[in-house]
Image: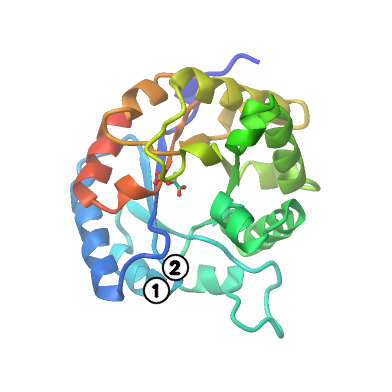
Amino acid sequence: MSSSPAQRRPFFCGNWKLNGSIAESLALATEVRNGVATLRNADVVVAPSFTALHAVAKRLEDGPVAVSAQDCHFEDKGAFTGEVSAPQLADVGCKYVILGHSERRQLFGELDAAVNLKARAALRAGLSPIICVGETLAERDAGETLGRVQAQLDAAIAGMTDADLGRCLVAYEPVWAIGTGRTATPGQAQEVHAFIRASVARRSGVAPTLRILYGGSMKPDNVRALMSEADVDGGLVGGASLQAESFARMVKEGS
Ligand code: PEP
């Protein structure tokens, strides 16, 4: 399908993973906020650990940088020891939640069906889910990239209305590019991003405005080439988001 990047505001989310005390997270959040203070043409989000969410959300309140969690449980409350619910995330000031990250899938056995339940819980709570999909190196080498992405996407958005889908973002994160320093080429990213948009277009009119992020060793020196592709609308950034200066530079380069 044809797509128009002009319909989609660039979106960059820093995924801080399991890093940072409250004090360190506050310092990083403040530096990011200051680093992007003059930027008007992109949405910027940071995703600290659960323990720092409340403090970071308070620090960034009313500013241009929003806060995301890195996961949530699919029930709103109950006997689920150790879990954190989507309404609790909304309560501490989150606007987004990353779901189905490959580290959750690979290290914690998260299944496609759980990603769907979590996304629906997030939507109920007023959060926007950032739904991650992506193939392993073995799947890519076996020519299964598009099939794997299709299966993950179909499962994650099953049962969603157009209004629900309109509040979601999708992150294409090839597993072989996450934290490895090996980035998908712009062409490889574009192929999958266009495929995702076309797939969503077959079931919903929101496809032209759906923001599809690339994730996997995105850095200041490769963001421009990736963002020049028609269907790459931003980034989900791990390592390079832990340095405020490089994250802010990347957002500026890519916007
Ligand atoms: C990620 O964890 O979502 C990610 C893309 O990490 P990195 O940028 O470090 O590859």
Q: Is residue 172 visible?
A: no
Circles 2, 1 touching at the beta carbon (< 8 Å): yes
Residue 114 is left or right of residue 106, and the answer is right
Provide residue 125's location: percent of width, then percent of height.
Answer: 62, 65
Q: Which mark is residue 93?
A: 2
The residue identified by callout 1 is 54
In the figure, 244 relative to 203: above or below?
below
Provide residue 244's location: percent of width, then percent of height.
Answer: 23, 51
Local SS, label 1: helix
Separation of marks 2 and 1 at Cα, in angstroms: 7 Å
Q: Measuring 63% from the left and 60% from the top, which residue is drawn there? A: 122
Amino acid identity at mark 1: His
Q: Is residue 32 visible?
A: yes
Residue 155 picture quarter: top right
Local SS, label 2: loop
Provide residue 132's location: percent of width, then percent of height.
Answer: 58, 45
In the figure, 222 relative to 118: above or below?
above
Query: Between disc 2 and disc 1, whose residue precedes?
Result: 1
